[in-house]
Amino acid sequence: MKVKDTDILIVPGYTNSGPDHWQSRWQSKLSTARRVEQAEWSKPVREDWTASVAKAVNEAERPVVIVAHSLGVAAAVQAMPQFRKPVAGAFFVAPPDVANPQIKPRHLMTFGPYPREPLPFPSIVIASRNDPFCAFDVAEDIAGAWGSLFIDAGETGHLNADSGFGPWPEGSMTFAKFLTDLKP
């Protein structure tokens, strides 16, 4: 698939993705990308967040490709039962361990647990070995359960602007390859 043939949905996580975050940069460069907005970025409510993701998927005019980061991954996956249109693929980066009772803030646990069934569309999960929001082996296990291609990002923190991932050219190249391999 090509960018022009898709509706790329950017699904940020907790507190949104700022202007230096790779998601914001990609959104400004990809002609068919749009952000899934949330009413409360700093006080996420699972039902509201999943409804926003489902609404964006269901309103899409072209095949949907989800690009989710952190809590956006959980929102997208938990929204799947509400999808009335098929998703062509999903690019998931730094999924948080929403089943971990030590997660901060604690209300993020309301987004868990993740479903354990294979996803009905191709997907990639990219995780860091030292992400403070998810142990590497947990991310790898989640990806395995979903049938996702799992990519080890090394020791790169939470894969956000704070950990040096503004432009993120490696991620952009990985996404471009993923998109090319998707079937409409």
Image (cartoon, rainbow, N blue to C red):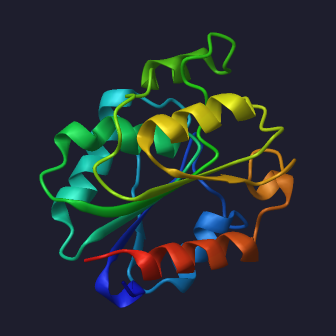
Corner quadrant of residue 26: bottom right
Residue shown at the point (45%, 19%) measured from the top left: 110
Q: Is residue 178 left or right of residue 171?
A: left
Q: In this orientation, which residue lies closer to the viewer: 175 or 51?
A: 175
> Relative to 114, is 59 above or below?
below
Residue placed at 73% from the left, 73% from the top? Answer: 170
**Residue 149, position as x, y percentages in the image:** 54, 54
Q: Quadrant of the C terminus?
A: bottom left
- Comparing 99 with 19, the one in front is 99
Say which of 145 and 92 sits in front: 145
Query: Depth check: 114 or 133 in front?
Result: 114
Is residue 17 left or right of 135 when viewed as pictured? left
Could you say which quadrant of the image residue 172 lies in? bottom right
Residue 36 horizontal side relative to residue 52, left or right: right
Q: Residue 29 appears at what percent x and percent y?
A: 56, 85
Question: How far across and down, in percent of the image, does residue 129 sit?
Answer: 81, 41
Answer yes or no: is residue 24 visible.
Answer: yes
Residue 158's place in the image compared with 100, above or below, is below
- Tell me if I can see residue 39 in this picture: no
- Total marks placed: 0
Image quadrant where one finds the N terminus: bottom left
Determine the residue located farthest toward the left in the rendered image: 84
5 in relation to 24, above or below: below
Specify whether 56 is left or right of 168: left
**Residue sitting at x 62%, y 10%:** 101
114 w.r.t. 129: above or below: above
